[in-house]
Amino acid sequence: MYTNDEHCEMVLLYGQYNRNKREVARFFAIKFLSRRHPSYCTIASAVQRLYKTGSCHRRIPLSRAHLQRIPAEDVLGYVLAHPESSVRDISKACSLLKIDGVEHISYVRCISLSSSPGAGTNARRPRSSF
């Protein structure tokens, strides 16, 4: 990772050297002998990131949501009670239920647990747009 000053210097030198990223990389290698110098690809990505996002720094993506462990009995019970519900509705309803002492599974395919045709799918109602 480079500091804010180094990123600013990369972008300013990129403009000073007429958008020649290889010349900027050579200049960094000559000027800063004692510390590491960026490759031309690093300079180009910093300039491109500044142009697109307004910041030279990479944004660390937020961690993806972990799969919730929902008891299979809860899912099956909800599907049997509400056969017209969607997978999203089942997920919301079952994630609110907390039963201790039941073996959990990492994910459940609600369609395979259904006992009636069309249960667990959006076959009977139109898909809503978000």
Image (spheres, rainbow, N blue to C red):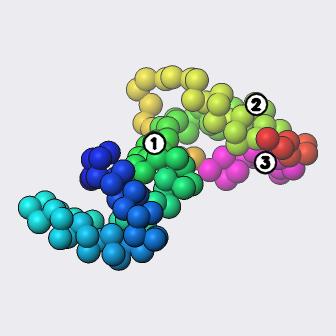
Asked whether residue 120 is drawn in magenta, I would say: yes
> CA separation, marks 1 and 3?
30 Å
What residue do we see at 40% from left, 70% from top? 17
State the image coordinates of residue 36 (x, y, percent, origin top left).
Answer: 17, 63
Numbered mark located on residue 62 in the image: 1
Q: Is residue 65 above or below residue 82?
A: below
Q: Is residue 80 left or right of residue 123?
A: left
Looking at the rendered structure, the secondary structure element under dot 2 is helix
Q: Amino acid at mark 3?
A: Thr
Residue farthest toward the left in the current orientation of the protein: 34
State the image coordinates of residue 107 (x, y, percent, origin top left).
Answer: 53, 46
Q: Amino acid at mark 2?
A: Ala
Residue corresponding to mark 2? 81
The residue range painted magenta reads 109-124
State which mark lies toward you, 3 or 2: 3
Question: Looking at the image, is mark 3 or mark 2 earlier in the sequence?
Answer: 2
Numbered mark located on residue 121 in the image: 3
Question: Looking at the image, is mark 1 or mark 3 earlier in the sequence?
Answer: 1
Residue 108 can be seen in this image = yes
State the image coordinates of residue 78 (x, y, percent, origin top left).
Answer: 69, 32
